[in-house]
Amino acid sequence: MSIINAKWYPRELTDDQKNVRVDYATVNLRAYNQQPSRLEHTVAIDETWVNLYRPPEKDQTKVWLATEEKRPSVVSK
């Protein structure tokens, strides 16, 4: 047995969320390929994430695992 920290991920997306992002990117690429001047009318907006909870500290994610067990994962935001 050994003690190990969980693996951290910035955020975890569902398969549906990933597919929606791929769909939007595909639509935008097709539109740009058909009319490159459309890029002049594109506005990029940075995402702002507001969290209502505080993610666990690194020490709080330590778990004891047997050698054959898989390391757990934790979403950090």
Image (cartoon, rainbow, N blue to C red):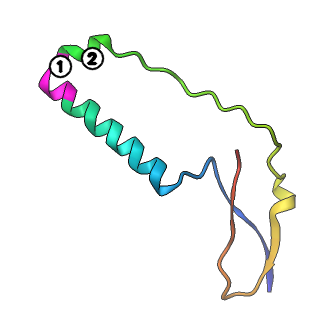
**Quadrant of the rendering where the N terminus is positioned:** bottom right
Q: Which mark is residue 36?
A: 1
Q: The residue under label 1 is which amino acid type?
A: Pro
Residue 65 percent across, percent down from the top left: 76, 81
Along the line of sight, the residue nearer the viewer: 33 or 6: 33
Residue at 79% over, 48% down? 55
| Residue occupying the point 33% across, 42% down | 23
> Which x, y percent locates residue 10?
63, 47
Real-space Cα distance between discs 2 and 1?
A: 6 Å
The residue nearer to you, when weighing 69 against 24, is 24
Above or below residue 51? Residue 32 is above
Left or right, residue 11 beside residue 15: right
Tag 2 residue = 39
In the image, what residue type sits under mark 2? Leu
Q: Where is residue 34 drawn, in percent x and y? A: 13, 25
- Give the secondary structure at mark 2: helix
Tell me whether the residue at label 2 lies in contact with that at label 1, contact meaning CB atoms closer than 8 angstroms: yes
Q: Residues within 10 Å of mark 2 (few under 14, many from 20)?
A: few
- Which segment did they paint magenta? 31-36
Q: Which quadrant holds residue 39?
A: top left
Q: Residue furthest left?
A: 34
Give the position of the C terminus as an image quadrant. top right
